[in-house]
Image (spheres, helix red, strand yellow):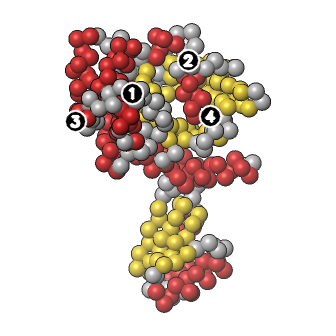
Amino acid sequence: MGMDPIIALDGLTRRFGDLVAVDDLTLEIFPGEVFGFLGHNGAGKTTTVRLLNGLLAADGGSVRVLGLEPLQDGPALRRRTGVLTETPSLDERLSGRENLEIYAELYGVPISEVTGRTENLLEGFELAHRADEKAGAYSKGMKQRLALARALLHEPDILFLDEPTSGLDPVGARRVHELITRLSQEQHRTVLLCTHNLAEAQQLCGRVAVLEHGRLVALGTPAELALKLGRSQRLEIEVVPEHVPAALELLKTQFGITDATQKEGTITVIGTDREAIPDLVAALVGAGVRIYGLTPQQPSLEDVYFALLHEEEVGW
């Protein structure tokens, strides 16, 4: 990418007894990226984040974050990173404002800036009207917003987000998405996003890494990973409704497509080779099937994700 990585992993490995939670992980993340970590529960995402922040020691390999060695330089590193875990972990006995003020002191935010930053974040996350109420009385979404505000309080260079829109309504989730985009594009901050929300990852992330059992099974942009599949995952063909049976029979006998479905004259074909589409259309027309429209859809990140994990399961 023409710049030095802000995070660099080389053969990073971490074990818990016989369990290999992170298995020989090698990758680089660059300044200003929104980088996605995808994988099932237990895939190694959270353990990797803990390793990157110096909260766990590696059993093998090397890791550098912001030019620092996380385990040795942990306090200095954590002053420059922000972390939002899936569970907000707030002090619910304190008000929203007090939660931010305490962390401002812990992060070493200059005293002259604490009030301004706190008020701006409370206002930006629509918590100002309840800032002096105990956090224990907040809804799940409000707690999530307060935790995200806390992670941004010291203006970190890198933001680690674990399911940041969990518990948020669509409006709140959209605002978080806008914030992530703004942090990356306008402030050139790096965001590492751990998520199960594949649509969210496709919308926000420039690159993604897919983890399975601690191993890296794919790395690239959503478009690059889709290209690796080598096929259009869905092909929608709209035909005259009475021609549907003939079309389905032709797809089965001439092209071996047995998993096509139809609804109200639209046939959906899964897993068609892109190169076969012209021949498929020609065959349908030649058989007298009248076609109103044809829409090939490129694989989504969800398609890619499940295809990759299927390959892992069957040992491809």
Closest to the observer, 146 or 189: 146
Q: Residue type at mark 2?
A: Gly
- Rounded to the nearest angstrom, the CA distance separating label 2 from label 1 is 28 Å
- Rounded to the nearest angstrom, the CA distance separating label 4 from label 2 is 15 Å
Provide the residue designation for mark 4. 44
- Which residue corresponds to the image point at 49% horizontal and 28% vertical from the top-left? 29
Few, some or many C-alpha atoms within 10 Å of disc 3 (few <14, some 14-19, many ≥20)? few
Q: Secondary structure at mark 4?
A: loop
Q: Earlier in the sequence, mark 2 or mark 1?
A: 2
Direction from residue 115 to residue 150 in the image, left or right: right
Q: Earlier in the sequence, mark 1 or mark 3?
A: 1
- Rounded to the nearest angstrom, the CA distance separating label 1 from label 3 is 18 Å
Check residue 93 in the rendering and tell me which mark sits there, or answer none: 1
Up-down relation of residue 173 to residue 48 (above or below): below
Provide the residue designation for mark 2. 54
Up-down relation of residue 122 to residue 255 (above or below): above
